[in-house]
């Protein structure tokens, strides 16, 4: 609902992150045509919450949209154009995540932290203390994306520069075969699977350098999350979201060097 209010006002009112997107939407569409779909009827909600294929087959909203969409417009829910004042100003303006400047100021935290969870927690600490202590999935995802963005700037500054200036990397780039693109400042593999029924993150995974400390933390995180997965499963799990260079070697190294795995195999 907040987004409907963003679209109804001048982009100048909002912080840059929101303002840029609102301006683009207002330029390419008519703001008055935007409506609101309650969360319970929103097909996209199934994606953000996650749903198994078995449940998705019978999830009518996903296949057909909300039931009222097939009805004449007069039966559609009314949008109550409530006064902005009922919303918290922080929510409406969506102040940029405080994590970004912190990450920029202290790149060395990549090396100081021994786990991905610690790293994400430390950059979100300020935000957590400011609010009610609860973090949303979106906040965690944004924190992670900020970390990836910074790690890419460290690992691939020339490739990012080339894409910004010419739309593609140089023929000699080691990323050339991935046909990388920049989306919101993040290097992603250009998806070959545009129409495949898989999440966006799998179609266009975020590119990482296997030598960067963040990549090590991410792959180690997935190794533990997937119950000390072996190299094959670990690679598949990581690639659901990321595309580290030379992942095979890294997955093997992390599995072989894991103390828990070592103890477990030795005791057999
Ligand atoms: Zn292990």
Image (cartoon, rainbow, N blue to C red):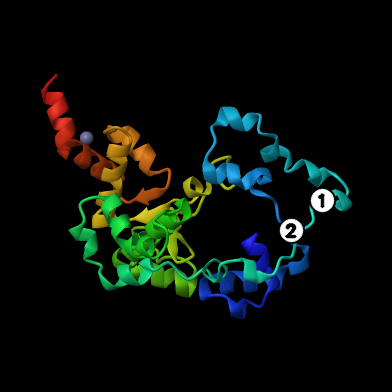
For the residue labelled by badge 1, is the local secondary structure a helix, a strand or a loop?
loop
Q: Residue at x 46, y 66 (%)?
A: 168
Q: Where on the picture, by quarter, is residue 71?
A: top right
**Residue 172 in view here:** no
Are the residues flagged by discs 2 and 1 in contact, CB closer than 8 Å? yes
Q: Secondary structure at mark 2?
A: loop
* Residue farthest along the bottom direction in this orientation: 12
**Where is residue 186 shown, x and y percent of the image?**
43, 62
Q: Residue at x 14, y 31 (%)?
A: 262
Q: Position of residue 136 (x, y in %)?
A: 46, 53
With respect to residue 52, does 9 lie above or below? below
Q: In front: 46, or 168?
A: 46
The residue closer to the viewer here, 13 or 20, is 13
On the rendered image, what quadrant is the C terminus found in? top left
The residue under the point 66% across, 78% down is 10
| Residue 125 vs residue 72, the one in the foreground | 125
**Residue 76, numbered label:** 1
Disc 2 C-beta below 8 A from ligand 1? no
**186 left or right of 49?**
left
Quarter of the N terminus within the rendering: bottom right
Q: How many marks?
A: 2
Q: Which residue is mark 2?
A: 35
**In the displayed image of the protein, which residue is found farthest to the top?**
268
């Amino acid at each position: 609902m907040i987004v409907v209010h963003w679209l109804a006002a001048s982009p100048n009112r909002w912080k840059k992150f929101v303002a840029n997107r609102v301006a683009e939407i207002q330029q390419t569409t008519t703001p008055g045509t935007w409506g609101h779909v309650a969360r319970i009827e929103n097909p996209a909600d199934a994606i953000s919450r996650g749903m198994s294929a078995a449940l998705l087959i019978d999830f009518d909203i996903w296949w057909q949209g909300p039931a009222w969409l097939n009805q004449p417009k007069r039966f559609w829910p009314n949008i109550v154009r409530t006064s902005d004042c009922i919303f918290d100003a922080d929510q409406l303006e969506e102040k940029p995540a405080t994590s970004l400047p912190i990450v920029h100021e202290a790149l060395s935290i990549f090396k100081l932290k021994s786990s991905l969870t610690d790293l994400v927690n430390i950059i979100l600490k300020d935000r957590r203390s400011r609010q009610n202590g609860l973090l949303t999935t979106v906040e965690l995802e944004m924190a992670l994306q900020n970390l990836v963005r910074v790690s890419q700037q460290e690992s691939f500054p020339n490739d990012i520069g080339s894409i910004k200036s010419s739309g593609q990397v140089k023929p000699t780039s080691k990323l050339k075969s991935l046909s990388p693109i920049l989306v919101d400042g993040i290097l992603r593999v250009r998806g070959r699977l545009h129409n495949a029924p898989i999440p966006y993150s799998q179609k266009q995974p975020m590119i990482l350098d296997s030598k960067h400390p963040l990549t090590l933390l991410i792959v180690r995180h997935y190794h533990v999350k997937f119950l000390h997965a072996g190299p094959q499963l670990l690679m598949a799990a990581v690639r659901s979201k990321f595309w580290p260079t030379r992942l095979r070697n890294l997955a093997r190294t992390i599995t072989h060097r894991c103390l828990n795995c070592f103890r477990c195999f030795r005791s057999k």
